[in-house]
Amino acid sequence: MRPLEIYVHIPFCIKKCSYCDFLSAPAGRQEQQEYVESLCGQIRSYGETAKAYRVISIFIGGGTPSILEGEQIAQIFLALREVFFIEEDAEITIEMNPGTVTQDKLKVYRDVKINRLSIGLQSADNRELKVLGRIHTFEDFLDTYRMSREAGFENINIDLMSAVPGQTAESYAATLHRTAGLAPEHISAYSLIIEEGTPFYEVYGEGPSPKVKETETGGFLAYPELPDEDTERQMYYDTKRILAEYGYFRYEISNYAKAGYECRHNIGYWNRTEYLGFGDGAASFIDHRRWTAGQEPEKLSREDEMEEYMFLGLRIIKGVSKTGFEKEFGVPVERVYQKVLADMESRQLLEQEGDFIRLTDRGIDVSNYVMSGFLL
């Protein structure tokens, strides 16, 4: 049986955040229940496919999965376990937001064998949370974190965001210290990206900041400035430095963990483990084919897969295995990428050590540029 990862998308939230471009929106209880029932039907339709696989990880993402009632989460896991062989030690994660979690829900999570929580904090500064459009305060987060520990969860990730409007290097450093001081097993630290189609894009997408935006009532609302480039760069370097002080090591460009608590599900993505996605907008990768829910599968060419092997693998700090590349494609990586490897090494953006090709610290700073060099 081949290893398989499963992603389940829950597209509901209480309120859309100002920066969010994910497929998510508020919905009523009846609409949520109808979605869950449809989701379970989709899962059960994969009975034949499931026979070839053993599930090594499950990730319930969103949206805000914790908006669902505990019974609905149990309903989803009943369908999953009816259809798939799930390994006893599978990593099973659910994303949750403060303000949507109760002790009863946490008990259900334990009952269905969820063993990893991912809590969306973003910032420990309540002013920054308000700017982001979050529904919670830092105090709400602390309540959720405490409840999660009391419920027995021993593997918790906390999401943080830098380059938030109005954020300073000092306020971001304070967020890092306050978060790491709680000793979660994993911290994901991302920089804000202004995406088209979001409220933030209307404010910050074009022209200088700060911006003033007219409200629906005819008034005007002033938005704080985005941090300048130097401040954003300082935040980037402070993340690695401060988290290292608390015993976190960087194992991927934006992810830090205590020893042994790397997110196995995400590592599977970067190593191109096969996965099935269930729910609106969920993506799948099976038998060299990739597709998004509702679309026809696309057969990847050999060149497509070589490109993916390199730019996904280079996200991991350990780097890309040369032996793994040759085993996968039947040709040494140097034969395919000799020119780009030599170029990037000469610029000190890549380095080789033993079997691995990896980004240097300088290469991580311009990772998108480096990875673009591996497009065939």
Image (cartoon, grey):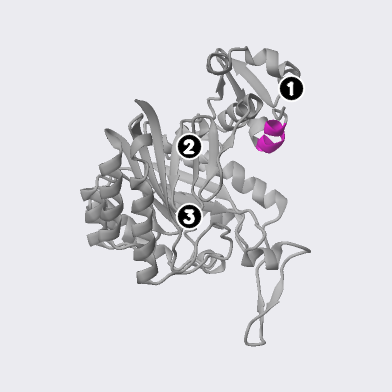
Percent across and percent down for residue 346 are 75, 20
Disc 2 + disc 1, Cβ < 8 Å: no
Residue 45, quarter of the rendered image: top left
Percent across and percent down for residue 151 are 23, 52
At numbered mark 3, what does the secondary structure look like: helix, strand or loop? loop
Residue type, label 3: Asp
Relative placement, left or right, of 312 versus 126 is: right
Residue 338, quarter of the rendered image: top right
Distance from the alpha carbon under mark 2 to that under mark 3: 38 Å
- Which numbered tag is attached to residue 244? 2
Is residue 98 visible in the rendered image? The answer is no
Looking at the rendering, the stretch of residues picked out in magenta corresponds to 365-372
Which quadrant is home to the N terminus? top left
At numbered mark 1, what does the secondary structure look like: helix, strand or loop? helix
Q: Earlier in the sequence, mark 2 or mark 1?
A: 2
Q: Residue at x 63, y 53 (%)?
A: 193
The main secondary structure of the magenta stretch is helix
- Which numbered tag is attached to residue 280? 3
